[in-house]
Image (cartoon, rainbow, N blue to C red):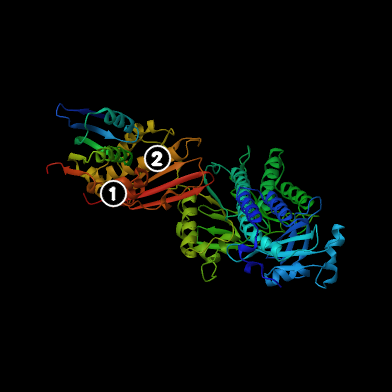
Amino acid sequence: MNDAAGHDSGGLSLEKLRCILEVTRDLARPFDLSTMLYAVVDAAKELLDAEGGTVWQYHAASNELEMRVARGLDAIRIPADRGIVGECVRTLAPINVPDCYADPRFNRDVDRSTGQRTRCMLTLPLVGYDDQLVGVLQVVNRRDGIFDADDEAVAAALAAQCAVALQRVQMTERLVSSEKLRQEISVAREVQMGTLPKAPPIVPGYDFAGLFQPTDDTGGDTYDFVACDDGRVFVLMGDATGHGIGPALSATQVRAMLRVALRLGASLDDVFRHINDQLVADLSEDRFVTAFLGQLDPGSHELHYHSGGQGPLLHFRAADHSCEFHPPTTFPMGAITLPALKPAAIAPLALGDVFALVSDGVYEYEDADGKQFGEQGVANVLRQYHDRPMPYLLGRLMDALSEFGRGAPQLDDVTVVLIRRLPERDPVLGDDLFAADLRSDVEGRRMRQSFARSYDSLVDIFGFIQRALAVDGIGAEARYAIEFTVEELFTNMVKYNPEGTGEIELAIEHAGGELICQLSDPDSGYFDVTAAPDADVNAPAEQRRPGGLGLHLIRRLVDSVAYDYSGRRSMITFRKTLGSI
Amino acid sequence: MFEIAATDKGVIVFSGRLDAAQCAKAEAFLATAADPREFDFAALEYVSSAGLGVLLKAHKRLMGSGGRLRLINVNNHIFDIFRFSGFDQLFEVQRTGD
C-alpha cells in the first residue's frame, strides 16, 4: 500500500498544485453541505480524470457511511465495516485498487444498487483537524487506465483540504439545526404558557394560587381555573406523559376542551368523561394525561373531583394541622374509554383548609444524592405557611425545593395549584381591610393602591408611601429605604414589561415592628429580579453601568426581598425592620 | 418636585427629589451646562438609582477632560446610598456640615 501522504509535492506537477489550491480556495467559501459535497466530488473527478466520485459521510454513532453524492442517484447507507471503504475507515489509510472485481474486499452491493460497473478505485480517508474521521473520498474509473502514485499524491492533498472544509460545514449545519429546534421549542413554550390563567379567580372567602415551571424542554403540564357564572369554580391540573412538544400540545388540548365544555354548561362528570373519551380517540396508545378536574362550590364549601391518575392530593386541615393524602380516583385520561364513571369524590373544606394539587415534579424533586422531597417536604411547608396568602405559600414551597435540591437540576415540570378556604376573618385578606384608608396610624393596618404602568406614576406612589408611613416610629432612614426600593422595583416592572396589562399594585403593611411592602404586576412573564447578580461597587467609573446597581442597593437598604410568581402575576415582597428610633 | 439650576459661579444646585421621572430633566440641563463639575445637594432630599445613573454619566464626561465630580452638602441618606454603591470612591463627596 502506498502512503500518499509520504509523497512530497515535488512529485506533483505545477498545474496540479495550482488546481488543488484553486479548489481549496473554493472550498473555503460558505457552502451548504450538499454544495460542498458536489464541489469536492467535481474537484476530485477533474484532478484525477475519473469517471465517478463519491464522498461518504461517516456517522460515528451508528458506525455507518452515507453517500449523499452520486449525481442523479439516491442516498445510500452502508455499515462502515464492510468492503474497501470499511477497511479505509478502520486503517485511516488510502487504498488503491486497480481491479475491483479481482479484489475480495470489494463490495459489489454498491454496484448492484447503482447499476454501474466499477473498474478501478482510489479510496482515501477524510480526516478532520481533530484527527477524527469525517468521511471517505472515493474516485472510480480513471478514464485512461488505473490510478498511479501521482494520482495518490494529488488525491491525498485534495482529501486533506476537503476533510477540513467538510467538517466545518457539518459543524455549521449542526449548529443551525439545533438553533432552529430551540426556536421552535421556544415558540411552543410561549403558546403553552400563554394558555395558563393570567390570574387566579377572585372568589369571596377563597384564595387561590397556581404555578407551572417547566424544565428546559417544553413540559407537558398545565393548570387552569375557570369561574362559572353560577359561582362554581373549576380547577384543572394535568400532566401529559413524556416531554417535548407533543405532551405540551396534549396538555393544552385538555385545557381547551375543558373551556369549551364549560361554555356549553356541561357538568363535572360529563366534562371528565368526554375529555377522556376524546383523548382516547386522539392520543397514540402509549400516551395519556394524568389530570385532576375539580369543581368548587363556594356556597357548600365542597370540592367535587375526579382525579385520573393524578395524586397524591393533599388536604391540609386547619383544625388540627393534619395533612391527608388522597389517591387518584380513576385511570389517567386518554388511557381507556370509561364505560361508567364512579361518582365524584368530595372534599369538604373547613375554614382555613388548604387543598393542594402538586405534580410529581415536586414530590419527586431530587437532591444531588437522589433523595426525594417527598410528601413530608410538601406537608412541612404547608403546615408552616398555611395561614399566609397562597401565592406567598407557593413562593416558599419553591424556595424549599431549591434549598432542598441545592443546585441539582430540575428533572421534571413543577406544577402546583393551591385552594384555600379563608378563615372567617383573615387578618391579611379580609375584605373589610382592603378599603384603601388614606391615613393609617394603627400598627397592623395594610394599605394598598394601584398605579398606572408609567414613570409618571412615581409622584402618586411617593404620595401613597408618605401616607402609609405617616405613623409614629417610622424614621427618615426607613422612609428613604422604602421609597428607594419601591421606585427601583416599580421602574423595573415598567421598563421590562411595558406590554403588560393592568395596573401595578403596591401594598404596605406595618406589623410586628417591620414594614412589609409588596409590589404586584398582574400580567408578566416569570422574571425573578431578586436572582440577578450583585453589582461590583468597586469598579472604576468607566466599567460601571447604572442598571446593575439598583438591586445591590436594595439588598443593603432592606432586610429581605422575595419573588413570587403565580398565574401571570409577579409579586415582589420586601421587608424592612424598624429600628428603635 | 425637582429643580436644577446653575449659580453665577457655575455651581449646579439640585433641589427636591431626583427620581426616575425627573432624570431626563436633569440630563437635559447638564448636557447644556457650561462646565458642570460641582453639584450642591443642600436642598436635594432624594436620589434614586436612576438618579445615580445621571451622576455617573456627568462624571464620565468630566473624566474625559481629566476632571472629577464634586458633590457638596449631601444629606446623610443620600450619602449612605453613595457609600453602599461605592460612588463615594468615584466622586468627591462632602456631607452636610462637613
> For mark 2, does the 10 Å Cα neighbourhood hold few (<14), some (14 to 19), or many (20 or more) residues?
many
* Side of A444 where A210 appears, left or right: right
The quadrant holding residue A413 is bottom right
Camera sees residue A423: no
- Numbered disc 1: secondary structure: loop
Nearer to the camera, A420 or A217: A217
Q: Position of residue A309 (x, y in %)?
A: 68, 59
Which numbered disc, 1 or 2, marks the residue that appears first in the sequence? 2
Q: Does A250 sit above or below residue A362?
A: above
Amino acid identity at mark 1: Pro
Q: Does B19 sit above or below residue B80?
A: above
Q: Look at the numbered discs 1 and 2 and tell me whether their residues touch, using CB distance below 8 Å.
A: no
Q: Position of residue A129 (x, y in %)?
A: 58, 62
- Numbered disc 2: secondary structure: helix
| Residue position marked by numbered label 2 in the rendering | A490
Q: Which mark is residue A144?
A: none
Q: Position of residue A377 (x, y in %)?
A: 51, 64
Q: Position of residue A11 (x, y in %)?
A: 64, 63
Nearer to the camera, A526 or B50: B50
Q: Are marks 1 and 2 on the same chain?
A: yes
Name the residue: 58% across, 43% down.
A197
Residue found at the very far top of the displayed protein: B8
Chain where mark 1 sits: A
| Residue position marked by numbered label 1 in the rendering | A540
The quadrant holding residue A132 is bottom right
Amino acid identity at mark 2: Phe
